[in-house]
C-alpha cells in the first residue's frame, strides 16, 4: 500500500504553507524524515495524501546572527548545529543535546525543527532549546509570528501547529559574559531511544552568586517542562552544596515524573533528576567564569 500519493518540493516558506493549505488532506511537511518515515512504514501514522518536502527551502537552513539573536533554521540538521562555532559560543546546551541524538547518520539527516515539531516531552533538542529561552518562528499562508517554545505543545506527541503551519526556525538570545548552559541525560545503551531523563540548565553568575537560572526537564509532564520554582529558588543565592541541595528538593517537589513501562519508573527518574540537576548546574557554573 502506498504511504502517500503526491510529493511536493517547494522552494520558499510561502510556497510550502500554501501547498499545505491547498493540497488534498491529509497533507503534512517532511524535513529529515527520520521519525516520520518510520512512523508511516510501521503504521504509527495514518497514510497521507501529500508530503511537502521542506529540504529545498534555503531560509530554513540558515544559521546566523540576526540583530541581537542567534537564528537557527528549523531545517538545520543536528550535526551542523554540533559543528557550528556560533552555536558552540551561544548555546552549549543545544550543542550537547543535538550531539546525543541518534547516531551520525541520523544526526546528518534529522533536523532541529523536526525534533521540536514531533512534540515529545523528552526530545533532546527541545529540552536544550527550552533552557535557552528560545522563541519559534511559525509561518502560515497569511502571516508569520514568533511564539515562546512552550506554546507549541498540547500533550505527548501533540503539536499546537495547525495543518497549514510550519516551523521556520528558532531565535535564541546571544550569550553574554558570565552566562553559560549545559545539558545532561541518561538513556539506555543502544544509543537511539528516547532518554530515560534529560535536563538542561542555563545560568548567569556574578562572583559567587547565581544571578538567574533556567532549567528544563524531560519527561516531567505531558509537555516539555520548565522548572520555574527551582529557577526562582536559585536566583540570588551563593553557589554552594547547600544551594544545590535546596534546588534538588525544589525540583522534586514541582516536577511530575511518571513511570514508563519501556524506559523507567517514576522513582528511578526522581533519583536521576537530582544527579542531572547537580551535574548540569555545576558545569554551567564553571563555564560561566
Image (cartoon, rainbow, N blue to C red):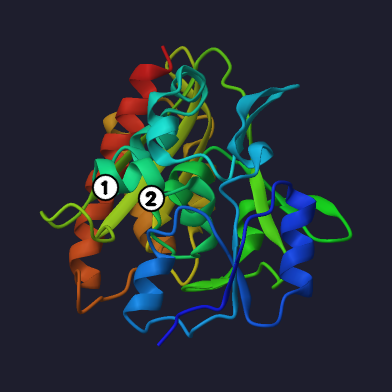
Identify the residue at horizontal 39%, vertical 62% (top origin). Answer: 253
- On-image quarter of the C terminus: top left
Are the two marked residues, 1 and 2, in contact with CB atoms closer than 8 angstroms? yes
Q: Which mark is residue 185?
A: 1
213 and 100: which one is in front? 100
Please tell me whether mark 2 sits on a helix, a strand or a loop.
helix
Identify the residue at horizontal 42%, vertical 28% (top origin). Answer: 92
Examine the rendering and report whether any part of residue 114 can be seen.
Answer: yes
Q: Earlier in the sequence, mark 1 or mark 2?
A: 2
122 and 209: which one is in front? 122
Q: Residue furthest left?
A: 189
Q: Position of residue 286 (x, y in %)?
A: 34, 18
- Looking at the picture, does residue 196 appear above or below residue 60? below
Kindly identify which residue carries mark 2: 124
Q: Label 2: few (<14), some or many (≥20) within 10 Å?
A: many
Please tell me whether mark 1 sits on a helix, a strand or a loop.
strand
Q: Position of residue 89 (x, y in %)?
A: 48, 18
Q: Residue 206 vs residue 41: left or right?
A: right
- Looking at the picture, does residue 142 appear above or below residue 4? above
Q: What is the C-alpha distance between the residues marked 1 and 2? A: 8 Å
Identify the residue at horizontal 69%, vertical 73% (top origin). Answer: 163
Q: Nearer the viewer, mark 1 or mark 2?
A: 2
Amino acid at each position: 500500500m502506498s504511504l502517500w500519493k503526491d510529493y511536493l518540493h517547494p522552494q520558499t516558506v510561502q510556497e510550502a504553507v500554501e501547498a499545505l493549505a491547498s493540497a488534498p488532506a491529509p497533507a503534512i511537511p517532511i524535513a529529515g524524515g527520520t521519525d516520520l518515515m518510520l512512523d508511516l512504514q510501521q503504521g504509527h501514522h495514518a497514510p497521507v495524501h501529500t508530503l511537502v518536502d521542506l529540504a529545498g527551502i534555503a531560509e530554513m537552513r540558515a544559521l546566523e546572527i540576526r540583530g541581537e539573536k542567534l537564528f537557527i533554521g528549523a531545517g538545520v540538521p543536528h550535526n551542523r548545529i554540533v559543528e557550528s562555532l556560533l552555536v558552540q559560543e551561544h548555546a552549549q546546551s543545544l550543542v550537547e543535546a543535538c550531539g546525543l541524538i541518534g547516531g551520525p547518520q541520523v544526526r546528518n539527516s534529522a533536523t532541529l525543527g523536526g525534533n521540536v515539531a514531533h512534540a515529545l516531552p523528552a526530545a533532546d533538542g527541545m529540552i536544550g532549546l527550552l533552557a535557552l529561552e528560545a522563541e519559534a518562528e511559525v509561518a502560515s499562508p497569511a502571516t508569520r509570528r514568533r511564539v515562546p517554545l512552550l506554546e507549541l505543545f498540547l500533550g505527548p506527541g501533540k503539536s499546537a501547529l495547525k495543518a497549514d503551519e510550519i516551523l521556520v526556525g528558532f531565535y535564541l538570545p546571544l550569550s553574554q559574559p558570565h552566562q553559560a548552559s549545559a545539558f545532561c541525560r541518561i538513556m539506555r545503551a543502544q544509543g537511539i531511544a528516547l532518554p530515560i531523563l534529560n535536563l538542561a540548565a542555563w545560568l548567569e553568575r556574578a562572583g559567587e552568586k547565581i544571578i538567574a537560572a533556567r532549567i528544563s526537564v524531560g519527561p516531567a509532564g505531558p509537555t516539555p517542562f520548565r522548572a520555574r520554582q527551582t529557577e526562582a529558588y536559585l536566583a540570588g543565592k551563593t553557589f554552594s552544596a547547600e544551594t544545590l541541595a535546596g534546588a534538588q528538593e525544589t525540583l522534586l517537589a514541582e516536577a511530575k515524573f511518571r513511570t514508563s513501562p519501556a524506559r523507567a519508573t517514576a522513582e528511578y527518574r526522581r533519583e536521576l533528576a537530582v544527579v542531572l540537576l547537580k551535574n548540569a548546574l555545576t558545569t554551567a557554573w564553571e563555564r560561566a567564569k
